[in-house]
Amino acid sequence: MTNQPLNSSDQSKILIFGLLMLPSLGFLVGVIPALFLVFGIFMMKKNEDFSHVATAVRNFRGYVSLILIACLIVAAYSATTLNEEDYWDRQDEELYFSLAFAGTCIAYLIFVKFLFINPLDRHSEWVEINGIFSRKPKSPTESVALGEVDIIKGEKLKQYSVADELIKWAKLKEDGHISEGEFNEARKKLLKRA
């Protein structure tokens, strides 16, 4: 199932998660976690490697967990002043705000798991090649792996062009762009077609 397009419910989950992230962007607290996720998706598309998204989600969880810990510390401190009636500065509002932010952090930790990473992880092979919201696979010419490309075409080569091609392949091998086996395979093809 990892090489199947996302169904509409999985795409809806990801869209809902994006919409749920919008309010946190307004408070500027959610900018950094959103940047983690956007960068992870960008790197996944660039390198066609799903591990970038998994790393971005791990960074997202770490950052939100730090905010959660800070909110819980503020809530614990504020809760110590509630029972002191003669205390001139009771911190009721700070307690309620920090508990609300802690609840929001817990909600985001749950949302990123069930609305973002789970749908993407179930379709990881599809997403890393074709994208999140695509329904059609890329055309074969776009998704051909480098090892499948036949660089040496079948036309009849002239003798001087074979020598030039062998020199080019030797240079590629010396520079470390191709392996010894790839060089030998290309040399055999070139000499056979000459």
Image: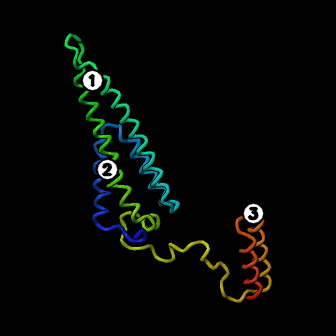
Q: Mark 2 or 1, which is nearer the eye?
A: 1
Say which quarter of the image contains residue 95: top left
Residue at 28%, 64% (x, y): give it: 9
Which amino acid lies under the numbered mark 3 shown in the image of this protein?
Asp
Q: Residue at x 39, y 46 (%)?
A: 34
Q: Earlier in the sequence, mark 1 or mark 3?
A: 1
Q: Quadrant of the C terminus?
A: bottom right
What residue is disc 3 on?
A: 175
Q: Which residue is mark 2?
A: 111
How far apart are the alpha carbons under marks 2 and 3?
Answer: 48 Å
Q: Is residue 31 above or below residue 189?
A: above
Q: Which residue is mark 1?
A: 79
What distance separates the C-alpha of mark 2 from that of mark 1? Answer: 28 Å
Q: Measured from the top left, where is residue 45 in percent x and y?
A: 47, 60
| Quadrant of the rendered image containing residue 135 | bottom left
Q: Give the residue at x 73% y 64%.
A: 176
| Closer to the camera in the image, 52 or 187 | 52
